[in-house]
Structures are given as C-alpha cells and as structure tokens.
Image (cartoon, rainbow, N blue to C red):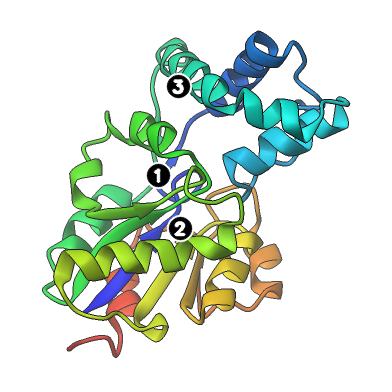
Amino acid sequence: MHLFLFDVDGTLLSARGAGRRAMGRALEAVYGVTGPIDSYDLRGKTDPQIVFDLLAAAGVSAVRVRDRLTRFYDRYAEDLRTEIRRSGGLAVLPGVSELVERLSDSPHAVLGLLTGNIEVGARIKLESTGLLPRFRVGAYGSDDVDRAKLPAVAARRAESLVGEAIRPDRVVVIGDTPLDIACARAYGARAVSVATGGHRFEELAVHRPDVLFADFADVSRVLAALLDGLSG
C-alpha cells in the first residue's frame, strides 16, 4: 500500500486570498494586532507557525499567543467561511478533480492530506469542491507546528486505517513549495512538486524533487508518473 499526501493551497486549489484575509481579521479580533500579514510569506508554513511569527513581530508574547490560540482558531474558521463566500468560492486547479478521483480508485493507493492548514480550515476549503471524501486520512497544522513532523502523523493514521505498516519509501508528498519538498526529504518520502502555487517551475527544480509538473492538466501523464513502480 502507498500513501499519497496532498497539500491544499496552491496544489489542489486556490482560495483567492481568502485565508490571508480571514487570518488578518481573526488576529485583529482576538489579539488586537495582525503583525506584518500583508508582507509575510505564507507559502508552505503551518497556520500556528504563521500566527506565532506574525505576533512575535508585533511584540506579542508566545505565552499570550498560546493562551488565545483556540479562540483564534474558532474565529478564523468563521471568518474563513465568510471570506470564501465573499470572494465567490474557491478555484480547483487544472486536472485536480480527475487526478484525485482516479488515484483514489487505485487498489494500491490511500489518499491523504498533508497541509499547514488547521484541520477545520482544510475542511472548510475542501468541503465545496467534492474532493474531501476522497482523502481518507490527514495531517494538519493543528497536529504540529513543524511541517516536517506531519508525514509521520499521516502515516500512523493510514496504518490504523488499512491495518498494515506503511514505510516512508511508500509515502509520496505532493505540494507546490520548497517546504513540501523538504518535508518529504525529512521523512524519507518521495517528493512530487507542482508549479501551480506561488513558486515557478524553475524555482522548484532547484530543490530537486523526485517529480516536477507545471500543472496537473495532463492527468494520464501525471497519474502514470505517480504510480510508476508503485504496484503491490
């Protein structure tokens, strides 16, 4: 059995800036400051890392951040739903729906999410796309602030689901940032990159992922590359 772990933003879909706007509103409501949210690079970061970084830059102590973090998450979820409605919904990226459907039908594959989003945020973003039921497990920013620790979380959950061990070399991490590649490497997983987020193809190539796509539009080619040598 092989475990395919997909990032959300920039890999499966574009939230059209809804996440950044919702986070800013929630930070202001819960902490009274937003920090440098307009200039901060969100790409590949976990939500808690983003919150701690932004608020540290604004002079908020880590203790105060932790004390109000659950409250922040609740407010962020409310604001995220509002911002997605205001922006006219999400955009599923080219080829993604067909790729996820066909890959999830493979008898050798378990699909999961590996995302810096907190779990409720990932579910809000995916619930209107029809993709969510295809992902049988997940590891989220709400599980650990350190993205590199999330593949192990997802693998444990997948092992409980299928009743067998899944070695790191049978895990595939799919994302759109260099941090996704580093996350895969740290766990010993296969790194697959796609240039549909904020990083150009050439930028991702420098980090030498195992497989690199401009996008997922050619679903048959992408599927063949993902499943190459992975039967059994």
Q: Circle 1 is placed at which residue position?
A: 93
Label pair 2/1, CB-CB below 8 angstroms:
yes
Mark 1 residue type: Leu
- Local SS, label 1: loop
Looking at numbered disc 2 in the image, what kind of residue is underneath it?
Asp
User: Which residue, given by chain and number where applicable, does mark 3 sit on?
Assistant: 77
Name the one closer to the observer, 202 or 227: 227
**Compared with residue 96, is residue 121 higher up or lower down, i.e. above or below?**
above
Evaluate whether residue 213 shows in this view.
no
Q: Secondary structure at mark 3?
A: helix
Tell me where residue 136 sits by quadrant: bottom left
Locate residue 158, reporting x and y percent.
Answer: 26, 65
Q: Secondary structure at mark 2?
A: loop
Labels 2 and 1: the sequence-earlier one: 1
Give the quadrant of the C terminus.
bottom left
Give the residue drawn at x 27%, y 28%.
128
Query: Which residue position is annotated with label 2?
Result: 215
Is disc 3 surrounded by few (<14), some (14 to 19) or many (20+) residues within 10 Å?
many
Answer above or below: position of 220 versus 35: below
Q: Quadrant of residue 21?
A: top right
Position of 231 relative to 216 (above/below): below
Tell me where residue 220 sits by quadrant.
bottom left
